[in-house]
Amino acid sequence: MPDIALWNKCNNKCVMCTNMESFARQDSSQYRLKCQIEKLERYLKGQGQVYLKNSGLAGFISLTGGEPTIHPDFFQLVAYFRRRMPGIPITLLSNGRLFADRKFAGKFARLARPPFSVAIAVHGPSAGVHDPVAGVRGSFSQTVRGLENLFSMAGGVRVEIRLVLHKKNLAAFPKTLEFLLKKFPDTGSYTVTAIHYEIEGMSLENHSSVGLKFSVSSKVVGAALPLIKKFSDFRLYHFPLCQLRPELRPLARITLPPEDRIYPAACRGCRLRRKCLGLMLEYYKAFGDSELKPVKK
Ligand code: SF4
């Protein structure tokens, strides 16, 4: 099932956001409650291509933005999506800041009945790293408080912490893991996902300051293996398997649709190919395939 853009505005200005600035400038009327309901009903009846991203992927939905939690009818939409798709896993992608308000987090936790998860991006181990990436001073403390509130709520919301890696925060990756282990030591209660950034939207605009090659990120991620092992559920998105040390390869997942990926000539004859996403298409356009090291039979 698709990625559904719930709202086009955001209260952060992340340097590696995959949306263009023009997305937030669009008229928001097409994202209002009534339109969202009409779109989902058309989708459920199979009336044409309603959603653009990942519409061919079955079995789950992602609610994205902008920042979904600042939608004026956020709670009505959470309740509506849950009611219309019982049993379908829903993931809400958020910067987590509004969950710093305990009442807000509590209301969300009551409506987001399982299977429901919220994926919150943490950009570093401190405000000094996180806030310049998010583009908002004070965002780190709100995001962390939001996570604390969600963890403290009884209920079925599963929390995923997303670490999107790029040039501005890669060096802080081990410290970010140490921070999470100290702040949220019950690692069985959440998932951590490290994601090599995508080259799209603002991350393309800001490429000179965020651009990062796999040969660089995979070294830092590989050196953090002892820390990674301390988490119960750790995942890696967007990494070609040949860039990862063998112990980390089982943690890699393919989450991008085939049209966003490529197996360049270097992948020919690689025995890892069946379980590997290859390269992100935009990455291939920007950096080529010279880093790939096919693993031969
Ligand atoms: S060579 Fe290609 S198929 Fe093999 S691990 Fe690397 S990216 Fe994946």
Image (cartoon, helix red, strand yellow):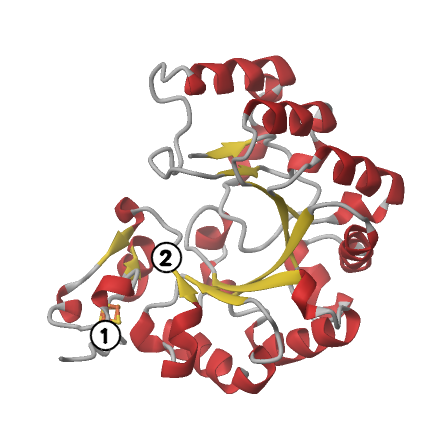
Left or right of residue 160, residue 222 in this image: left
Left or right of residue 82, residue 285 in this image: left
Label 1 – label 2 distance at C-alpha? 21 Å
The image position of residue 98, as x and y in percent, is 78, 43
Which one is in front in this view, the residue at disc 1 or the one at disc 2?
2
Up/down of 129 relative to 59, above or below: below
Figure quadrant of residue 27: top right
Tell me the residue at 43%/38% (across/down): 59
The image position of residue 175, as x and y in percent, is 67, 79
- Closer to the chain start, of discs 1 and 2, is 2
* Amino acid on which disc 1 is placed: Ser
Q: In the rendered structure, find residue 212 and report the number of the disc placed on it.
A: none
Residues packed near mark 1 inside 10 Å, few (<14), some (14 to 19) or many (20 plus): few
Image quadrant of ligand 1 equals bottom left
Residues packed near mark 2 inside 10 Å, few (<14), some (14 to 19) or many (20 plus): some
Up/down of 213 relative to 2, above or below: below
Tell me the residue at 54%/35% (across/down): 87
Q: Which residue is most to the front?
A: 87
Q: Dot 2: what SS? A: loop
Q: Nearer the viewer, residue 276 or 233?
A: 233
* Amino acid on which disc 2 is placed: Ile
Tell me the residue at 15%/80% (across/down): 296
The image position of residue 264, as x and y in percent, is 17, 62
- Pointer 2: what residue? 254
Q: Is mark 2 within 8 Å of ligand 1?
A: no
Q: Is residue 86 visible?
A: yes
- Pointer 1: what residue? 290
Q: Quadrant of the N terminus?
A: top left
Left or right of residue 269, residue 273 in this image: right
